[in-house]
Image (cartoon, rainbow, N blue to C red):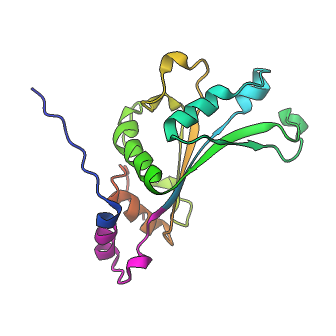
Amino acid sequence: MSKKQEVQTLSPKEIAKKLKQELGVKNDLAVPRVEKIKVHAGIGTYTIKANNKDFTPVVNNIMAITGQKPITSKARKAISNFKLRAGMPVGVSVTLRRKRMYDFLNKFINIVMPRIRDFRGVSVKGFDGKGNYNIGLKDCNVFPEINIENVDKPHGIGISIITSAKNNREGYVLLKAMGFPFKDEIK
């Protein structure tokens, strides 16, 4: 029989205690933490290329993944080269905070990332210089909530993890303590 490997998840308080020692911070409020997570997807392929105004599959997939109804972003001005008119929907996004944020992050790290094809870890190039991390997935079918049989046209999603870290190193240490599988170290 093979033993299933149990995933240990640390609570935010345990992570803060660990980071306080590792970063040498004395004040509890100065310890970096995850503030919010934004999950977003573009819907340009549904509205422009297919000549179809129905993008509800994307909305339903994001709603199933996050547990919240996404808001629709509309174009502010017309761009003729992209066949885009002012007021056309261009994307959907969800902002996760508090318990839903930690539940999503736990699911993303422990369930979704191992399901990604040829996954060997995420790169540290996703940091933006201020401790926030961005990752894009080409296909949303790696999430267990998505029924592959119901997806007629696959779409990608972007995930932005916004932290209170001051620099990339603090953001890296925070996400590493949460269990993020980085394939290389930050310099």
Q: Which residues are magenta?
A: 16-34
Q: Which of the two residues, 172 or 154, is positioned nearer the viewer here? A: 154
Q: What residue is shown at x 36% (from left), y 40% (from top)? A: 120
Q: Which of the two residues, 86 or 56, is positioned nearer the viewer here? A: 56
Which of the 4 image quadrants contains residue 60? top right
Quarter containing the N terminus: top left
Q: Is residue 87 above or below residue 130?
A: above
Residue 165 on the magenta segment: no
Q: Is residue 87 above or below residue 97?
A: above
Q: Is residue 152 left or right of residue 83?
A: left
Q: State whether residue 161 appears in this view.
A: no
Find residue 95 and report its horizontal and vertical position in percent: 58, 51
Looking at the image, the residue that sits furthest to the bottom is 26
Q: What residue is shown at x 60% (from left), y 17% (from top)? A: 152
Q: State whether residue 91 appears in this view.
A: yes
Q: Is residue 8 left or right of residue 46?
A: left
Q: What residue is shown at x 34% (from left), y 42% (from top)? A: 110
Find residue 82 and report its horizontal and vertical position in percent: 83, 35
Q: Is residue 88 left or right of residue 156?
A: right
Q: Is residue 24 above or below residue 178?
A: below
Quarter containing the C terminus: bottom left
